Image: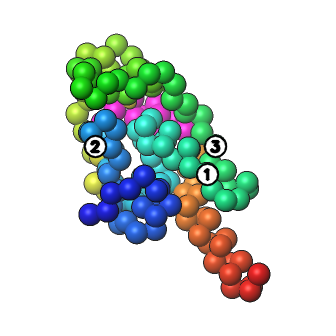
Amino acid sequence: MFISHDLSTVRYLSHRVAVMYLGMIVEQGSAQDIFSRPRHPYSIGLLSSVLLPNPKLERRSEVSLQGEIPSPIDLPKGCYLASRCPFVEDACNARMPDADDIGNGHLVHCFKHGNVIDEEKATLDYFERFQEEAEKLLSTGL
Ligand code: SF4
């Protein structure tokens, strides 16, 4: 098991990835699914915050997380992301969503993951693309 905040390394090393927020796994699946088709708003926020060393590979996202992070010693009874999530609805504050299996072992704890994928247009795996471009550059000897 490899635990890190360095998403570039996680992408490079991992076959399966679990995203945690405030001590809870909110999304898990194959590395390819998590990096190219994230469904949980926190996963999208996390991926969007990564700076890649090439402006052409900036990961743009329609999903923006704002607001306060709950105290880890006084967690809400509903979804932990409810105070920051642009998709929040009443049900999110009432209880924590169960995991939905959306195929290929891709599990997501979010009532609105169907809406999230409609909003999120950044479906390319930028880490994979960055690696491909870096390999092209290195092979030319530059
Ligand atoms: S369950 Fe609700 S608050 Fe939690 S991530 Fe999904 S939409 Fe946002």
**Between marks 2 and 3, how big is the CA–CA gap?**
24 Å
Residue that badge 3 annotates? 60
**Between marks 3 and 1, how big is the CA–CA gap?**
11 Å
Closer to viewer: mark 1 or mark 2 = 1
Q: Amino acid at mark 2?
A: Ile
Q: Are marks 3 and 1 in contact (CB under 8 Å)?
A: no
Residue at 33%, 57% (x, y): give it. Answer: 3
User: Residue 75 in the image: x percent, y percent?
Assistant: 26, 24
Residue that badge 1 annotates? 51
User: Residue 18 in the image: x percent, y percent?
Assistant: 32, 51
Q: Is residue 34 magenta?
A: no
Residue 29, visible in the rendered structure: yes
Residue that badge 2 annotates? 25
Residue at 24%, 26% (x, y): give it. Answer: 73
Which residues, given as a range, are shown in magenta?
108-120
Q: Is residue 117 magenta?
A: yes
Q: Secondary structure at mark 3?
A: loop
Q: Amino acid at mark 1?
A: Leu
